[in-house]
Every structure is written in C-alpha cells, then in structure tokens.
Image (cartoon, rainbow, N blue to C red):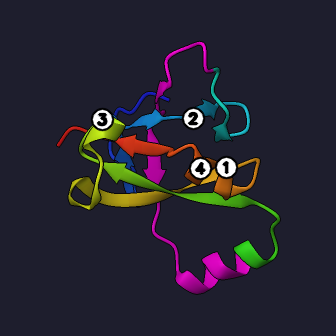
Amino acid sequence: MKVSKPPELGVYITGLQLHNAAWNEATSSLKEFNPSTRNITKMPIIWLKPIEKAVLEKDRQSSDALYYDCPIYTADTAAHLGTTGIVGSLELPSMCDPAVWTQCRTFLSTEI
C-alpha cells in the first residue's frame, strides 16, 4: 500500500519491524518465521482507526479471531529490551494461540 495523503480518520504507522515472527500478507496476521532466515520482518503500513470500545467488544465477542498484544520497543535487539524501552503495544491478529508469541519473545521495534 502506497500512502499519498493522511487518512480521513485515524493515522498511518510506518517503520515498524517485527522480531521473532513473520507477517502473513495473505491473512494479515502473525505467522512463525523460518529459523534459518533472519528473524526480523519489516511490517506493512498499519492504519490505526479510532473505534468505540463497545463496538470493539461486540465484534470480539462474535469472532473467533485471536490477537497478540505485541509490545513496541525503541530498541531493536532482545538484549536491550526492558520496561524502559517500551513505547506501547499493538494487538496483532494471530492464527495461533497468542502464548506462542509470548514464548518466542515476539515484539515490534521502532526508531524514535
């Protein structure tokens, strides 16, 4: 997706890198990475759209979708991670149990 102007509602986020997981473009969800390759994936542009909490909760109740609350750090290596480098988190869709991503220490990083 190429961005030529800001969205009418919300914001676009660019420049995030996904660590210890891969991104499945077809399903727009997390997938396991191939350990024989680099474990960092450049994330596509993410569109954050505001939504009422009640609407979100209703959608979640009627769906079997799984989400991993993925931390976002300013550091780009696991050796530098800690609570001081956290800038937030994003709920990323997953095709498997989110505990898998916690065990893999999956995270997003950005340069601020």
Local crowd size for mark 2, using a 10 Å CA cut-off: few (<14), some (14–19), many (≥20): many
Local crowd size for mark 1, using a 10 Å CA cut-off: few (<14), some (14–19), many (≥20): some
Q: Secondary structure at mark 4?
A: helix
Circles 3 and 1: CB atoms closer than 8 Å? no
Circles 4 and 1: CB atoms closer than 8 Å? yes
Q: Secondary structure at mark 3?
A: loop
Residue linked to disc 4: 103
Q: Which mark is residue 100?
A: 1
Residue linked to disc 3: 76
The magenta segment is 35-59
Q: Residue furthest top?
A: 36
Q: CA distance from mark 1 to mark 2?
A: 10 Å
Circles 2 and 3: CB atoms closer than 8 Å? no
Q: Is residue 21 left or right of residue 97?
A: left
Q: Amino acid at mark 3?
A: Asp
Q: Earlier in the sequence, mark 3 or mark 4?
A: 3
Local crowd size for mark 4, using a 10 Å CA cut-off: few (<14), some (14–19), many (≥20): few
Q: Earlier in the sequence, mark 4 or mark 2?
A: 2
Q: Secondary structure at mark 2?
A: loop
Residue at the (24%, 45%) spot, across then down: 74
Q: CA distance from mark 4 to mark 2?
A: 11 Å
Q: Amino acid at mark 4?
A: Gln
